[in-house]
Image: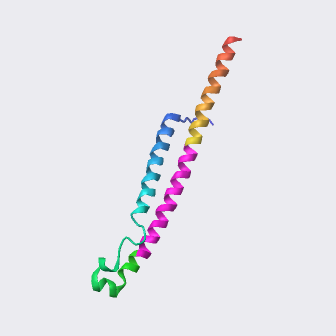
Amino acid sequence: MAGFRMDAEVVGGYAKTVDAAAEELGGAVGGLRDGALTEETFGTLGKELGLVESYARAAAALRGQLEHGAVALRSASEALHKVTTNQSGGDGDAAVQIKKAGEL
């Protein structure tokens, strides 16, 4: 591809950043676990209004979104690591071929 240049080191660094972001999202899921709040948390009015149940539904939806986001980031990270590995390997192969050509 003419005009396209990839820096494997930059892509590798970006892959590590995506790894860290996936870990952060995965860690945030724990903060939304079931049972974190009880009926006593919101008092009598909260119990009458069903705030614990409402919070639990909202937390479940957010937990699902965070889990899906973490999965997507892990997938992107794996792809970036593969690209980096392939690119680095290609550079090594090219260096070997250039060295062999110089020996001829």
Farthest residue toward the bottom? 48
Please state the extent of the stretch shown in magenta in the rendering.
56-80
Quadrant hosting residue 27: bottom left
Front residue of 47/86: it is 47
In the rendering, at what x and y percent does residue 4 appear? 57, 37
Image position of 37 (left or right of 18): left
Q: In this orientation, does residue 98 appear?
A: yes
Q: Give the position of the C terminus as an image quadrant.
A: top right
In magenta segment, residue 79: yes
Say left or right for 82 vs 104: left
Q: Residue at x 33, y 88 (%)?
A: 48
**Considering only vertical position in the picture, is 25 above or below 10?**
below
Q: Which quadrant would residue 31 be assigned to in this image?
A: bottom left
Q: Is residue 65 magenta?
A: yes
Quarter of the image with the N terminus is top right
Query: As drawn, which residue projects farthest toward the top?
Result: 104
In the image, 73 versus 38, the foreground residue is 38
- The image position of residue 49, as x and y in percent, is 34, 86
Q: Would residue 4 appear left or right of 59 to someone viewing this image?
A: right
Q: Residue at x 50, y 43 (%)?
A: 15
- Can residue 7 be seen in this snapshot? no
